[in-house]
Structures are given as C-alpha cells and as structure tokens.
Amino acid sequence: MPVLHSTKNLRVVSPPTSTREGVGIFEYTDNYTVFHYGRMPDPIPGKGEAVCRMAVANFTMLEEAGVRTHFRRFIAPNQIEFTLTRLPDLTARPLTPEQGNYLIPLQILFRNELPPGSSVHRRLAAGDLSPADVGLSTVPSIGEKLERPLIEYATTRDDVNRFIAPGEAQRLAGLDDVHFEAMRATTLKANEVLTGHAAKIGLSHCDGKFEYLLTADHELVLADSPGTPDESRLMFNGVHCGKQILRDWYVRSGHEIPVSKLIAEGVPRSEWPNPTPLPPAFVPVMTDLYQSLSEAWTGEQRWNASGLEAATRAVTEVILP
C-alpha cells in the first residue's frame, strides 16, 4: 500500500528491522505544498519528473564528492529506490547512536543568503531571533549574502516544525558529539557541492534543508531530496525558482491559509478552509519553470522548455506583475 507524503508517495519494498535497513521507493508527484497545509489543490504537470531528475543528479554529484546518501537507483521517469530506516518512537526512550537504523527526527537548515521570503527576516522582526543568533552584528538587509553558511535545526515530527537550539537538537537526534559534529560537517560539504553547481549555471542557492538517517552500522547518511526546489531555495536573476512564487501570491492576494493559528486554536484538520485554486494561467508558467530549472541543472534537454531566462520572465509577467 503506497503511503502518501506531501510531494512524494512512498512504497515500502522491504521494511526495515531493528538490525537491517529496508528498501523504499519514492514517487515524485506533481503536487506542491505551502503553509504546512499539505497538498495544495492544483498539481503542476511535469513537476514530479523534473524534481526527480534533479534529485538523481544531486545524489550522483554528492556521492562523487564523498557524501554518502540513501540513493540506490533511478526508476524512470519519476521514481527512486532508496535505503529505508525505521521511524523512531520519540516517546518510548531517548535515541542513542548505538540503536542505529533510524531516521533522525531533525531538519538541518543551511543559509547562504537571506532573500525575500526567508524566515530569518520574519523571526528577527518578531523578536524571536537576534542578529547575533545568525552571526551578524546588525539586522541583515533583504538579499544579504552571509560570509559563511548559517546552520539551524528544526523538528520534523511536530504539527508545525519549530526551530530548536543545537543542544536540544542533539538530544532529540540521539547523537553523541562525534556524530552530531559529523552531521554538521556533512551539511557544510553537501551545501558547498550544490551551491557550486548552482553558481555554474547562474543560480543562487540561497538556503535549504537536509535530513539524515543513521544506518544499522551507525553511519550517517544524507536522505530525502537534497538540492531540489522542494528542499532548497534557488533563484535566477532575483526570481524564485520554486513554490515560494506561489506562497507569495497566496499571501499577497489574501488567500493565505493560517495553519499555525488554526492549530493553536485547536481547529480540527477536517474543519480547515480549502485553499483557493490558482488562476489557470499560473499552472503552465510553473510547469515551464520547473522543467527549465531541471534541464539547466541536469544538462538534459527533455521537454523543450523555454530556459530559465524566459521562464523567470514569464513568472514576473504572469504571476508577479
């Protein structure tokens, strides 16, 4: 039975055990998510394959750079087979590296720039964050490039993910000092590989998030879909190349779904309002953007997409006039 995820469907081929990893297959769908709502009403045709092919290219790049990943093989056109570990029960007992074979319940976020839409700006304005917390002496400007990447941690098992301090992150992940430092070092290395590739094709790799698993032999492995527009913020000539475009439209048009407020007020998920569908003209523009991004990133010309220059221009003319 497939398990429906936000933008991917999971099929378990071989379930993990306490001593052995399993095997799973991710099917990349044409869905997108914003506001922690889950799948939004409008699929973007072609998005799933475009993102999947980017993920495969990234796994190949990272493995060649010495970063171990959960990737096993590509199943064309929009699936990957990967190493599957257990989802830990966080209420049973504290995690430890000796247990092994579990998905670490953290997102590790990295920031190279602070573009429009970065949560750092919102958190600074609300007083939830200080400039010192991001290694700065003053409030950063929108679009500011950081001298060195900022690393942050967030939960993955809450209704709305929350930022947490490194100490709490280490305890939640069940990692000793060696493994926790290795996770940070791997994040910096993987970010360097992906950011360097982005720069070669004229893209800014502003920020993103990684997830990790700990294998049965106690090795850290990079998981999920690193460096894709579902996990990273990529920009071309100042235009977002992903769902931030649609998130901005929902906010600007007054159709944002206030998920955090709904959860805080205890409103059942079944009673949440349905998101407003996108204007029909937006969908082909987003399809071309995802396909243009994938073709530029992978070097494979599969869809005769218009290219990033034309695709981002269409975004500014149709969606963000």
Image (cartoon, grey):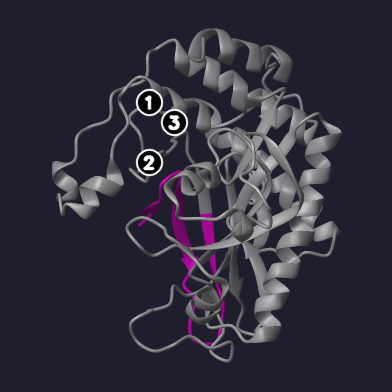
Q: Nearer the viewer, residue 152 or 65?
A: 152
Closer to the N terminus: mark 2 or mark 1? 2
Residue 173 pos. (x, y %): 52, 77
Residue nearer the viewer, 20 or 55: 55
Residue type at mark 2: give it. Phe
* Vertical placement of residue 280 versus 18, above or below: above
Tell me: 180 left or right of 273: right
Question: Which amino acid lies under the numbered mark 3 shown in the image of this protein?
Answer: Arg
Residue 77 appears in the rendering: no
Label 1: how many residues lie within 10 Å, few (<14), some (14-19) or many (20+)? Answer: some
Query: Which of 207/24 is in front?
Result: 207
Left or right, 161 with respect to 68, comes to left
Disc 1 secondary structure class: helix
Q: Secondary structure at mark 3?
A: helix
Query: SS for tag 2?
Result: loop
Residue at the spot of label 1: 250
Amino acid identity at mark 1: Tyr
Q: CA distance from mark 3 to mark 2?
A: 8 Å
Query: Which residue is identified by label 2?
Result: 35
Disc 2 residue crowd, few under 14, some 14–19, many 20+, Cα 10 Å: some
The residue segment tinted magenta is 1-25
Q: Is residue 104 above or below residue 52?
A: below
Q: Are marks 2 and 1 in contact (CB under 8 Å)?
A: yes
Q: Earlier in the sequence, mark 3 or mark 2?
A: 2
Pointers 3 and 1 in contact (CB under 8 A)? yes
Residue 233 position, x and y percent, is 62, 39
Would you place residue 91 above or below residue 159 in this image? below
Which residue is under mark 3?
247
Q: Which mark is residue 188?
A: none
- Point out the residue furthest to the front here: 138
- Where does the image place residue 196, in percent across and percent down from the top left? 83, 44
Asked if disc 3 and disc 2 are in contact, CB closer than 8 Å, the reply is yes
